[in-house]
């Protein structure tokens, strides 16, 4: 989320575009509805299910991505229900921040 927001506001480091494209390409290859929340450094699935927080952060990566797949990640965020239950606080905060970022309503109040 941090590098994607940095790119969307300042667009100074082209590595941020590459990082977002690579991140989304990995999760797209895993399947937009099938990717998990835990992986080894080598890319092996370790389980964990698909969390709202990860869906939210993958959508936010689209702010810096320049591949058309970014739209599918944003649609996945909008389709996600509001988090509830045991993990609602952490997932809910990432969900809220992603909605603000992806809708263009996250603002910087600069001097």
Image: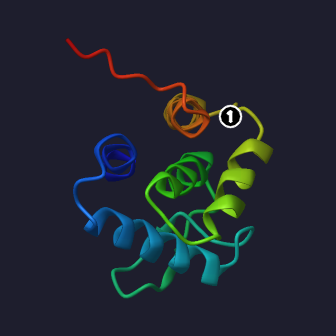
Q: Residue furthest top?
A: 111
What element does badge 1 sit on? loop
**Percent of width and height locating residue 41:** 33, 81
Tell me if 22 is positioned left or right of 37 in this view: left
Residue at 55%, 32% in the rendered image: 104
Q: Is residue 39 above or below residue 9?
A: below
**Percent of width and height locating residue 19:** 35, 69
Figure quadrant of the C terminus: top left
Q: Residue furthest left?
A: 111
How many numbered tags mark residues here? 1
Mark 1 residue crowding within 10 angstroms, few (<14) / some (14–19) / many (20+): some
Q: Is residue 7 above or below residue 31?
A: above
Q: How is the image coloured?
A: rainbow
Tell me if 48 is positioned left or right of 82 in this view: left
**Percent of width and height locating residue 20:** 42, 66
Splitting the image into 4 quarters, where does residue 36 fall? Answer: bottom right
Residue beneath disc 1: 83
Residue at 71%, 62% in the rendered image: 72
**Percent of width and height locating residue 101:** 51, 36
Residue at 43%, 57% in the rendered image: 64
Tell me if 68 is positioned left or right of 89 in this view: right
Residue at 48%, 64% in the rendered image: 65
Tell me if 109 is positioned left or right of 44 in this view: left
Q: Is residue 36 above or below residue 3?
A: below
Splitting the image into 4 quarters, where does residue 5 fall? Answer: top left
């Amino acid at each position: 989320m941090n590098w994607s927001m940095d790119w969307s506001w300042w667009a100074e480091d082209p590595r941020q575009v590459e990082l977002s494209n690579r991140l989304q390409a990995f999760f797209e290859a895993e399947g937009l509805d099938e990717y998990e929340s835990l992986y080894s450094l080598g890319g092996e699935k370790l389980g964990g299910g698909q969390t709202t927080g990860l869906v939210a952060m993958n959508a936010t990566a689209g702010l810096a991505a320049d591949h058309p797949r970014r739209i599918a990640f944003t649609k996945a965020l909008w389709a996600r229900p509001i988090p509830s239950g045991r993990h609602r606080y952490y997932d809910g905060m990432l969900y809220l921040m992603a909605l603000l970022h992806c809708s263009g309503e996250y603002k910087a109040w600069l001097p």
